[in-house]
């Protein structure tokens, strides 16, 4: 399984489309097997869900995203978790331990 976290430096980005990079974790049975970083290729409507799907991502975690983006991720079978806050390290640990508290915060401007 691959989990992508939208991030700026080492903290979760407020909006997945405007982040600096995606920290991508390869996970199996709750253990992190590896981590890579993918620079954000740019925010164009509809592009990032397809791009991350092509990278094999199964879950996207972010501070926020637009409702249309959530729909597109769902169409690609990618679970979306929004409203996450904190460092990337803390968020991935919380997710793996089933303790990630997400608000479900949806941005209403899809930009």
Image (cartoon, helix red, strand yellow):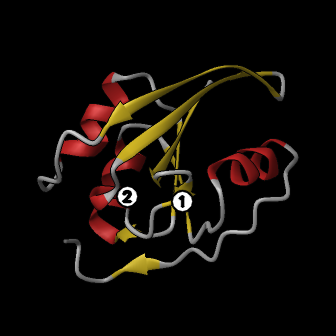
- Residue 37 placement: quadrant: top left
For residue 25, above or below residue 47: above
- Which residue is label 1 attached to? 12
Residue 11 placement (x, y as % from top left): 56, 58
Left or right: residue 76 compared with residue 24: left
Q: Residue furthest bottom?
A: 108
What residue lies at 43% left-to-right and 77% top-to-bottom? 106
For residue 69, above or below residue 102: above
Disc 1 element: strand
CA distance separating discs 1 and 2: 9 Å
Circle 2 residues within 10 Å: few <14, some 14–19, many ≥20: many
Which of these two is toward me, 89 or 107? 89
User: Could you tell me if the residues under marks 1 and 2 are in contact, i.e. CB atoms within 8 Å?
Assistant: no
Q: Which mark is residue 49?
A: none
Left or right: residue 14 compared with residue 50: right
For residue 101, above or below residue 60: below
Q: Residue furthest front?
A: 9
Left or right: residue 81 compared with residue 74: right
What residue lies at 57% left-to-right and 72% top-to-bottom? 83
Residue 53 placement (x, y as % from top left): 36, 30
Q: Quadrant of the C terminus?
A: bottom left
Disc 2 element: helix
């Amino acid at each position: 399984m691959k989990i992508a976290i939208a991030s700026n430096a080492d903290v979760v980005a407020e909006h997945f489309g405007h982040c600096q990079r995606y920290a991508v974790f390869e996970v199996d049975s709750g253990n992190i097997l590896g981590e890579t970083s993918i620079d954000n290729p740019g925010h164009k409507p509809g592009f990032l869900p397809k791009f991350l799907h092509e990278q094999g991502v199964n879950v996207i975690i972010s501070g926020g995203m637009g409702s249309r983006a959530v729909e597109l991720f769902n169409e690609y079978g990618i679970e979306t978790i929004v409203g996450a806050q904190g460092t990337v390290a803390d968020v991935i640990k919380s997710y793996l331990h089933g303790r990630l508290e997400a608000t479900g915060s949806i941005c209403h401007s899809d930009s």
